[in-house]
Structures are given as C-alpha cells and as structure tokens.
Image (tube, rainbow, N blue to C red):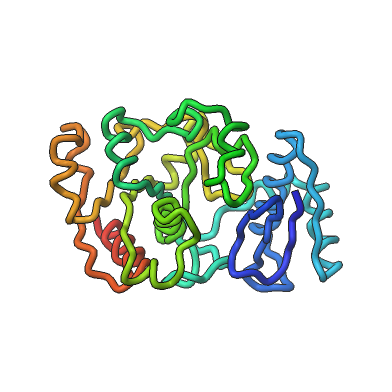
Amino acid sequence: MIINIGIHEGPIIWDNVYCYSLSDFPNISDWELKKLILFVKNEKMNNRETKIICEDNNIIKKVNFAIDNSEHFLSVDIPKKIMQCTACKQKGCLTDFFCHTSSIDDAKKIFNCGKILSAVRARNKTGVELAKESRNAANDPPDFFSYVMFAWGNCQAGDRLVMERFLGRSPNEIDLSIGFKPGVRFYFKYNIIIKHKNYLDDGYHPAKIKDELRLYDNLYCCIIPKHHENDFLNIIPEDLSFRIQYIENDCQNIYDWSEKVYDYVQEL
C-alpha cells in the first residue's frame, strides 16, 4: 500500500493508494501522525508493506520519527473536530458519533437479525471472493470485508456508497441532488464503540468492528427516511422501537440531508 501524503479532497484509499490529506499542509498534527502509525501497524498485521511518499521531505522525517517513537503518539486524544476533509456543512468531521449507513433492503435484514453483519457474515462469502467482485471498485483488500465499517456522524460518505451500489456506478452531482435516495443511518456513541471487544482503529476508517455488532447493546438511534416508515413498522423489534426516528427528506441534496440528520441526532 502506498501512502500519498499531500493536499487531497479528503482521506481515501483507492486501488492500493491511501491519499492522506492533512488539515494544514505542510504541517502535520500529532493526531494525524497517530493515524498513520495505526495504519502502518494494521497493514503489517495483514502482511502488507507500506511505502510513504510526500513532496515535503520534512513531513517524511516527522512520520518516520513518529513510527519509531509510537508510544508517545498513540496516547494522543481524538480532537472534537477533524479537518482532513471539509466537504460537509460543518467543514470537518465531528467525533461524538459514529454512523453506519445501509440501503433500505439491507436495513430490513439488519432489524430481522438484530445485528449489523460484516460483508463476509452477511453474504456468506470469503473476503477473497468479495474482493474480486466488480462492486469492489476501490480494489479494497480481503480483510476489509470482515468488518462492520463506520463513518463519522456528520459525514455523507455512507449515503454516497449506498447510492453508488444502487446505481452501479459512481454517483454524479445530479444523482446526489434531485436523484438522491437516502439510506438508513444507524448512530452509535463514540465512547461506546471504542470499548467494544472487537473494535479496531486501522488508521483509515473512523472505526470498525470485527464480524458483527448487536443493535440492542450498542445502538444510540436509527434514522429512517419518513416515506419508508410503513416498510419498517412490522419489522423493528419492540425493544428497539424507541430508538427509531423517521425524518422527512425535504432536502436539496446529500449534504443538506446529512446536516439535517446530524442536527436531529444531536438534539435527541
């Protein structure tokens, strides 16, 4: 895996290249160094080597120093706001909630079993098999599919992925505005998820959980688009019903929807 540190729209892994965005290039924060340490560690655990590239040699020196002195950087606390990506209305990732977004059909399956399952568990295929599928456009490695993945609570990445799977291609701005169809958002408190026995910070995803995550033990709330309310009334278990909220999608695009949902969750 190549880590390309520079000015990018946001952190993303695509075809074995981790475009690592800095919030204040060419300065690199201790938090950003911590995430790089965790990423290198996770790659090594999965028998993959990493190569770090950057046009600024001072950054390379700082990263190498941090890796060699990781005990100091691994104790760095998470900031309230991460500004490596500023595509959202809040101009940064707010870190009090994690979010997992699914399609409407997948959400029904989640409620029926009471768990969010990794792709390996949900589809009964190996990570190697899933990695070879055409829907794996980013060429993610096999181990990714053994985890339940999360975005930050105010991020629109989950809904973007749902649209991508629905369309069978990368969504354009029209798809994300007049053609936008929100998925179901499952929200979890940051301080709950990081205590889960199968929690992992791989230095890329905000969080991920190996194999499965039980809703009853962990769910903070779930946001379902209002016009799908009738689809879920007879599916949602009674012991989870008080955590379900139905919200009208009267928004102009995916960004407005993300902001509306996040503001609603914060007020609960």
Residue 256 to residue 36: above or below: below
Quadrant of the rendered image containing residue 250: bottom left
For the point 22% across and 43% down, the residue is 243
Q: How many marks?
A: 0
Which residue is nearer to you in this view: 219 or 231? 231
- Position of 159 compared to 57: left or right? left
**In the rendered view, would you say 54 is above or below 185?**
below
Quadrant housing residue 71: top right
Quarter that holds the C terminus = bottom left
Find residue 61 and report its horizontal and vertical position in percent: 85, 61
**Residue 85: x and y, percent?**
55, 67
Whether residue 96 can be seen here: no
Residue at x 20%, y 36% (from the top left corner): 236
Residue drawn at (63%, 52%) of the image:
76
Residue at left 52%, top 36%? 147
Looking at this view, is 160 or 115 the one in front?
160
Answer with left or right where residue 125 lies relative to residue 108: right
Horizontal side of residue 158 vs 229, given as left or right: right
Q: Nearer the viewer, residue 239 or 227?
A: 227
Q: Is residue 189 visible?
A: yes
Q: Residue 197: percent from the left, percent from the top? A: 50, 29
Residue 226 locus on image (x, y percent): 18, 56
